[in-house]
Amino acid sequence: MSYISSFLKAVTLYVGKGGTRATLLDYLLSGMLKTTKPRGKVAMDNLSIAFPQSTEEWRKDMLSKVYSHFASTLVECIVALNEPDRLTGWFKTVEGKKYLDEALTSGRGAVLLFGHLGNWELLGGWLALSGYPVYAMVRKHDDQELEDLIDGYRQRMNLKIIDKDNIREPIRQLKKGNFVAIAGDQHWGRAGLEVPFLGKICSTPSGPAVYAILTGAPIIPIAAFRRGKFDYVFEAYPPIEPQRKGDSKQETYRLTMLATRPLRR
């Protein structure tokens, strides 16, 4: 058993359904991350690239807040694993839900595009527990025991999974009127589309746009923004409709630019 999976199993039992133990674990994890600063240099370099006018003091403060956020994110996921029904109450503000309801009622399904911001695991869990037929495309972890733990969490949330290498299953699910959730902020190298992001040209996956064109399903950007501990805002943005006639390459680029706009704001 790996150290990470052993640690997660232990703290899951320790935290239980939250309360004082969850608060204490959050405090300890936050302090540990701020002390050890994992990938700290990479994060500081990236902040310098994204915010070239920022001061070093600002970047250090931002990195400290990121570590606090990740500590809280882990604790929240653990509490949700032990008591899934509490998760829906943590999304105290919900905006744009009508876009999801309209897509579901239409029977066309939707490509849900999200980024790795806020708490994306809770985002998927909230959608599934709210009754939406969500299939999330994910890459399996190399550590099988850790993967089993994460998969157990997703099962408790009733969140269904599609391996990211299975390129046909998303099409089948969209044609059934289901939702397929895909991260749109991962680097795809030569296989991706080059789009501007924070002043730089980056490679992003073309899959969301391609699936929309092939099935006629709209792309709906979504996000879960933290307001506090166990306190989130859900946002869904207006659907982006694919044009299935004409130059498919141009349409793929157009859809990708529009769909990733909320991630760049």
Image: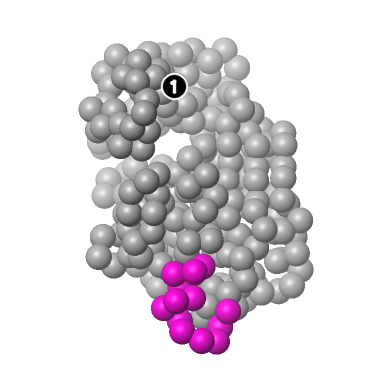
Q: Is residue 22 above or below residue 3?
A: above
Q: Could you tell me residue 248's position as x and y percent?
A: 45, 81
Q: Is residue 190 above or below residue 51?
A: below
Q: In screen coordinates, is 92 left or right of 11?
A: right
**Residue 254, magenta (yes or no):** yes
Please state which of residues 129 and 17 is positioned toward the viewer in this rendering.
Answer: 129
**Residue type highlighted by circle 1:** Lys
Q: Is residue 81 visible?
A: no
Label 1 neighbour load within 10 Å: few <14, some 14-19, many 20+: some
Q: Which residue is mark 1?
A: 65
What secondary structure do most residues of the magenta stretch adopt? helix
The answer to whether residue 243 of the structure is visible from this angle is yes
Dividing the picture into quarters, in which one does residue 238 lie? Answer: bottom right
Magenta range is 243-255
Q: Dividing the image into 4 quarters, which one contains the N terminus?
A: top left
Residue furthest to the bottom: 245
In this rendering, position of residue 22 left or right of residue 108: left
The x and y percentages for residue 261 are 52, 53
Decide whether residue 177 is among the magenta residues.
no
Q: Position of residue 251 (x, y in %)?
A: 49, 76
Counting every numbered tag in the picture gives 1
Locate residue 228: give its quadrant: top right
At 46% from the left edge and 73% from the top edge, which residue is drawn?
252
What colour scheme was applied to this rendering of the protein? one colour
Residue 117 spot, x, y in % from top left: 48, 40
Query: SS at mark 1?
Result: helix
Q: Quadrant of residue 50?
A: top left
Residue lying at 34% horizontally and 20% vertically, measured from the top left: 55
Q: Residue at x 61, y 60 (%)?
A: 220
